[in-house]
Structures are given as structure tokens and as C-alpha cells.
Image (cartoon, rainbow, N blue to C red):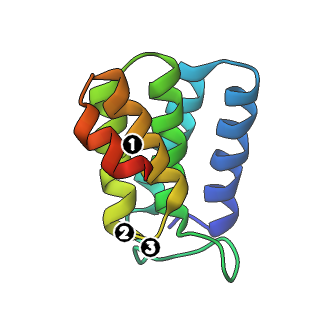
Amino acid sequence: GVSMEELLKEKVAGNKAYAEKKYSEAIKHYSALLRHAAPFPAHTREKEGAPPLRSVALSNRAACRLKLGDFEAAVKDCSDALEVYPAYEKALFRRGEAYRGLKKWKEALTDMR
């Protein structure tokens, strides 16, 4: 199986690629994290009080997709992140941004309130 350490390595690599504006590369890392995280419980967290790692990876991948203008995929990632962790403000805000990109104003307003 995959260790928590390996999951976090993908997260760190994804965050670094994002910071360097290498969005497609970042997506690969977040996707790998999600694949490897599959056997873990859905609410596995990096540390106490943090959002579930799966939600973080989905929300971060959505941020990359927003940057690339792939709004439909960003909406789906955010919705999946919120399914695991409905209280995730960052995912809600990013989904609002994606809806705005799709000119779905009503949905955007609901998410960004």
C-alpha cells in the first residue's frame, strides 16, 4: 500500500508546480494523490483540524483547472471535495469562481455568499 508520506509528497509536488504556474503538471500530482488515497478512509487528514486530504487535493486540482479555463472540470472537482467535506469554504469559493467562468450567475452567487 501507499503511505501517508507518499500522499503528502504528491501534495507538496502539486503545490510547488502550482506556485510555478505549471498547472498541468500540478494536476498530475493531485490526480496521483487521489488515486493513491483511494484505499484510505474518505476523511483521512494530514493533521488534526485540517480538511480531509482528498478534499484538499480535489480543491487544489480545481484551482489548476480554473487557471486553465477548464470550468466544467473545476466545478466537478469542487463538488466532489464538498461531498467529502461540506464545510470546505475554499472549495465552495472555487466552485463559485468556476460557475462564474461558465456564466452560471445564480449558482455562482449561491456558492460565494
**Between marks 1 and 3 in the image, the one whose residue lies nearer the viewer:** 1
Q: Earlier in the sequence, mark 3 or mark 2?
A: 3
Identify the disc placed on residue 84. 2
Which marked residue is nearer to the observer: mark 3 or mark 2?
Answer: 2
Q: Tell me the element at label 2.
A: helix
Q: Nearer the viewer, residue 19 or 94?
A: 94
Q: Residue furthest bottom?
A: 48
Q: Quadrant of residue 100?
A: top left
> Element under label 1?
helix
Residue in view at x 65 percent, y 72 percent = 50
Q: Which mark is residue 40?
A: 3
Estimate the x, y position of residue 84 in percent, counting from the top left: 36, 69
Within 10 angstroms of label 1, few (less than 14), some, or many (20 or more) residues? many
Q: CA distance from mark 1 to mark 3?
A: 25 Å
**Counting residues from the N terminus, which is met first, the one under dot 1 or under dot 2?**
2
Mark positioned earlier in the residue sequence (1 or 3): 3
Q: Nearer the viewer, residue 75 or 99?
A: 99
Q: At 53% from the left edge and 28% from the top edge, which residue is drawn?
A: 64
Q: Residue at x 43, y 33 (%)?
A: 97
Three-letter amino acid code at the position of disc 3: Phe
